[in-house]
């Protein structure tokens, strides 16, 4: 069964928006190239409920996705703790 995941997008104006979605089917060996392709675009694009949501990266401060997947891009620093 697919595990539910959440994404929260934090915008440069201080607002945020959250979505829930099923675990995506990405082969472990394609994770690095998938991350590179997503980050190489000008917008984060999400699809659901008959709509497409497009968020320009220039308006995004950071993105939080949870729970973490076992397959992460090369160079990921692991086990960090957010300090406020």
Image (spheres, helix red, strand yellow):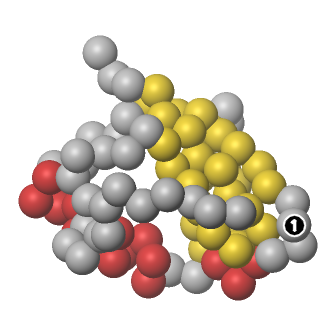
Circle 1 crowding by C-alpha within 10 Å: few under 14, some 14–19, many from 20: few
Determine the residue positioned at 33% across, 77% down.
36
- 11 relative to 66 in the view: left or right: right
Question: Would residue 51 be seen by someone viewing this image from the given angle?
Answer: no
Q: Residue furthest left?
A: 29
Residue occupied by mark 1: 14
Toward which corner of the image does residue 84 lie, by quadrant? Answer: bottom right
Determine the residue positioned at 17% across, 61% down.
30
Count the numbered circles shown.
1
Determine the residue positioned at 59% across, 34% down.
20
- Residue 74, image x, y percentages: 20, 73
- Residue 15, image x, y percentages: 87, 60
Who is closer to the viewer here, 33 or 73?
73
Toward which corner of the image does residue 34 lie, by quadrant? Answer: bottom left
- 75 relative to 12 in the view: left or right: left
- 73 relative to 61 in the view: left or right: left
Q: Considering the image in quadrants, where does the N terminus appear? A: top left
The residue tagged with tag 1: helix, strand or loop?
Answer: loop
Determine the residue positioned at 62% across, 63% down.
83
Who is closer to the viewer here, 78 or 35?
78
- Residue 35, image x, y percentages: 34, 69
- Residue 24, image x, y percentages: 35, 41
Question: Would residue 24 be seen by someone viewing this image from the given angle?
Answer: yes
Q: Quick check: 50 above or below 73?
A: above
Q: Quick check: 49 above or below 66?
A: above
């Amino acid at each position: 069964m697919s595990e539910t995941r959440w994404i929260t997008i934090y915008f440069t104006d201080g607002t945020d928006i959250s979505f829930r979605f099923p675990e995506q089917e990405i082969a472990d060996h394609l994770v690095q190239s998938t991350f590179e392709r997503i980050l190489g675009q000008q917008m984060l694009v999400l699809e659901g409920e008959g709509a497409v949501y497009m968020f320009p990266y220039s308006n995004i401060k950071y993105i939080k996705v949870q729970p973490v997947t076992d397959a992460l891009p090369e160079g990921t620093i692991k086990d960090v703790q957010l300090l406020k």
